[in-house]
Amino acid sequence: MPRPVSYFSQKFLLCKPRREILTLLYNLRVSFRKSWRNYSTDKPSEFLFISWIRYDIILLMKSLKILKQLDIVSQCRKYGLSLWQCPQFLFLIMGIIIILTGLVAYAIGNRYVAEPEIVALIVIGITLILFIIAFTITNSFERLTEANRMKSEFISVVSHQLRTPLSNLSWAAELLMSGKLGKIEKKQTEYFKILKENSTRMGELVKDLLIVSRLETKTLSFTNKEFDLSEIVKKLIWEFTTFAKASNVDLKFKAPKKLSKVWADSFQIKLVIENLLDNSIRYIKDKGEVQMRLEQRGNKIYFEIKDNGVGIPKNDQKYIFQKFFRSENIMKYQTQGSGLGLYIAKSIIEKSGGKIGFISQEGKGSTFWFTLPITS
Amino acid sequence: MKTVLFIEDESALQKTFGDILKDEGYKMISALDGESGLRIAKTEKPDLILLDLILPKVHGFEVLKELKEDKETKDIPIIVLTNLEGMGDVEKALELGATTYLVKASYSLEEVMEKIKKTIGD
């Protein structure tokens, strides 16, 4: 039987429209599954055929990935650099020059072998060109690093500058609402409330942006000490009671009486649980329940938070800890949110020597968990 | 009547605190930069100082250091009220002698007033 690699490879490469490629892959998958079901030990050739198809698909997928990486123009566009400032493009040019000069040097060397000065001059000339290209590449890397540093600095400066007017606004609204400056009408209170709520919302976003900026510039301070994680959870449950009641959500918490203390920054860990708890309550549709529990697993403390909310679609699950990512189904229920909470949570837990993860089913709910080291 | 010196360059905040402190029965004196803050603290000797850190002329940390080194003013409680929350800022302020460090964005006006009352007494 002829090996099917060439057939599928050719067909794959020839059919340009994406839909066709996807259909072909789908058909391959279906035929593979069907053949697998029919597979028995007395049909070794069929099994071999399946292995070849699998091998072919893996090869094609790998080639596609490499091809994607070779798309230098779009890669350079991603950085916002012109081609002649883009390291990938310059590396490619350098490679081509090295190959061409090798060939030219060989040809010239063959012809002028009696005059080594010419060959030496050519080598010096080529080295000079390569030196200039290498210098430009280094320069481009420097620009990219500088651009990244400036981006973080920009976020930091803007966030700081935004914080002051936001505090002014929020406190002024609070003072007006308190009635200490004179009696206010019910209708006015409603509008002051809108002012206060929106400035708080902006304040939260600015706070998250500042944390992200500090995480990226490695300037977020961690003051590790031992503390009781269950105390933090209880405190947060108390703080979230009003929000949970307003959202028709019951908060439950279970922890063993004797639990080792954890070694981390209590302020940052509080922020993580706050983010997880806020998400759990926020993404419960009408009414529901959030269950939290703590337990000791070896030299780690395990924290779990389970809700019966909207859940995360399978396709979105791999992106959930990415910066600014917001799941599509979540946008249907709750448009508010920056998509930074889980990114911050993951960064903080990993910096504290723990692990974080989740399981989720769309329409059924999500369970997020993390571990933290106990005090040694 | 107890006196509070508010060293803060934001006039909007000066106004807000002026009104709320008056309502709570305190007298507030304003200073819009670090230099005048230091001068007023030494002449008026208030019962409490509310101090921002990013200030014109003299930085808040310098003001704090100088006030805590001066025999005349070292016992005046100082609440740092700022939005500066960088690495080591809190530790530095507390080491220099600040009574409390409050990040503006993390507290409501009512919470700040509670801290003031707790520090100064009614």
Image (spheres, coloured by chain):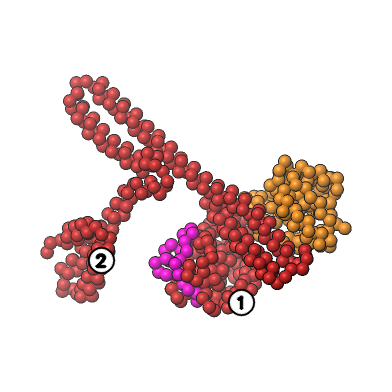
A332 is higher (above) or lower (below) than A145: below
Colour of the chain lettered B: orange
- Residue kind at label 2, given as amino acid type: Thr
B31 is higher (above) or lower (below) than A272: above
Residue A110 as seen in the image, left or right of residue A350: left
**Which chain does the numbered disc 2 sit on?**
A
**Which chain does the numbered disc 1 sit on?**
A
- Residue at the image point whose x is 77% and y is 63% from the top: A181
Question: Are the numbered discs 2 and 1 placed on the same chain, yes or no?
Answer: yes
Mark identifier at residue A74 = none
Image quadrant in which the N terminus of chain A is located: bottom left
- Residue at the image point whose x is 71% and y is 60% from the top: A172
- Residue at the image point whose x is 73% and y is 63% from the top: A175
Of residues B112 and B119, the one drawn nearer to the viewer in this rendering: B112
User: Which chain is assigned red?
Assistant: A
Say which residue label 2 marks. A23
Mark 1 surroundings: few (<14), some (14-19) or many (≥20) residues within 10 A:
few
Residue B32 as seen in the image, left or right of residue A145: right
Q: Secondary structure at mark 2?
A: helix
Say which residue label 1 marks. A245
